[in-house]
Amino acid sequence: MGSGRAYINLNVGLRDLDLKADTFKVEVLPSPAIGETNAPVQVPYGVERLRRALGDLEAKRIEREDLAALGTALMDRLFPDGPVRQLFLDGLRKAGLDGGLRVRLFIYDPRLANLPWEFTCLPQNGWGASHNSFLVLNPQISLVRHVPQSREYVSPRVTDVVERAIRMVVAIADVQDARFAPLGLDEERQAIETALQELRKRGVSFTLEAVLENPSRQDLVTALQAGCHIFHFAGHGVFRQAAFLQPTGEWLGAGFLVLVADPVSRKPQYVPADVLAAYLQQAGARVVVLGACGSGRHDGLFPWMGVAPALVERGIPAVVAMQYDVMDHYAVAFARRFYLALVDGLSVDEAVSLARLEMFEGAQHAEVEWGVPVLYMRTDEPRVVLFPAGGPSEAQNVAALEEEADPLELYELLVNHFSMTDIKDICLRVTHAFKKDGISEKLDPELLGGKGKREVAYEIVGFLEKRGYLGYLVQVIRAVRPDLSV
């Protein structure tokens, strides 16, 4: 069950970057539970002074002291001394130990979005010198990027019940093009599969609908037709700037997912982010994870800058994008904890926080993977729970049995250990289980046909196998005959 941590929102705007003056403006936008600043505060941009530290961070060779110095510099820009920082501290106090403070960043310039705000650090006596000095490692704080868009906001659609198993589609695209670094397909696939194996041991049922290697746009669309709760993509993304709107201070641009035109040439095929968003919305996606495997930063820009906001704007409740490469064992740690926390009924904020702490635990001196994930959400609800069941449901447990079911073994059990009367009772029990899980099918041996026990058993097993419902038969047999090994 989720811990029930409710978040209050602190809305922070970053805008008006002036390269000539080397400054930008920060303000606390109206935040009902906390307040707002009377006017924007001008702060130094000073990215050139941070260039070396930023390079060391991306290369994963930054020392702990230098990371703390970089984090402090980011803190001075995001929450400068004065009313902005005071409102941050007020919000933290108001949230309390059992609540949370969600810092929502409204970023109006891609160059400001390119800074790794997830490494912001505030050392002070109240927190001591522990890892909680970094904001995102404090369980009370959630840092969310809410990039402003000109289009009308579409509210995320979150269904109360996930039927049977949680469905997941994984796509890994390794294009052959000098502009893109090669990817480690085997390592990425292994990281995801390892994470899912550990989840299944905990009783969580995941149906991995597809693992697409070097898919085209059509391949991805086909895979999504069966439905998808979680979409995990490992590959490249690009952002193309188009124009700057002086009245609003917004940069217009477009994000693209890079798939392959065909599996032989593996030339890049660019899928616009808004098109991808439409497909994912139709599939029922709730969570999208964008892994920046080998992408690096093109033209100094965060590769998912145009993709993640487009997905959230279209109605995907949560998007997690990796702003740097992630080492394999940390990718496993993040996926395992993040997905498990979500299906256990925790909020997205809590799931990301726990996953960061999982990455941090046991980290070596220069390892900074915990700050790599970037969370995008548009909602301001106190708790954003995507899988409210609070753990694996009965239907999800049945789906887990489906993977272990052997049709031949089940047929032989029915024939050798049950009478026709017993089989009719089993069919009634299965039909009752269907009804509980909202399945309109009815398992009726008379409607299935067949003469004699062997033919009836054959029809029953065939009927269930064709529909992916053998797990229900396994469950009922275990209930009525626990002495049988099935």
Image (tube, helix red, strand yellow):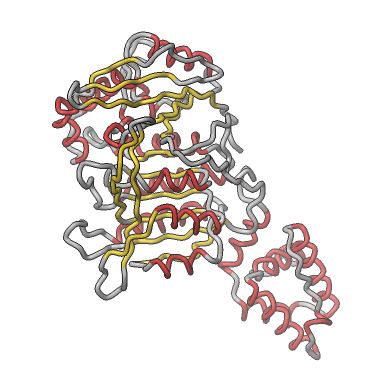
Vertical position of residue 411 compared to residue 50: above or below: below
In the displayed structure image, the side of residue 398 where residue 97 appears, left or right: left
Vertical position of residue 429 compared to residue 92: above or below: below
In front here: 2 or 169?
Answer: 169
Which residue is painted at 80% across and 91% down in the image?
451
Which residue is painted at 24% across and 25% down in the image?
18
- Residue 370 appears in the rendering: no
Q: Measuring from the top left, give residue 483's x and y in whole percent.
A: 71, 66
Q: Measuring from the top left, give residue 485's x and y in whole percent.
A: 64, 69
In the displayed structure image, the side of residue 409 where residue 339 appears, left or right: left
Residue, far front = 247
In front here: 405 or 238?
Answer: 238
The tally of labels here is: 0
Q: Measuring from the top left, give residue 335's x and y in whole percent.
A: 42, 48
Residue, far bottom = 451
- Residue 34 appears in the rendering: yes
Which residue is painted at 34% across and 35% down in the image?
245
In the displayed structure image, the side of residue 14 where residue 183 appears, left or right: left
In front here: 200 or 339?
Answer: 339
Classify the position of the N terminus by image quarter.
Answer: top right
Classify the position of the C terminus by image quarter.
Answer: bottom right
Q: Measuring from the top left, give residue 116's x and y in whole percent.
A: 29, 33
Which residue is painted at 15% across and 28% down in the image?
48
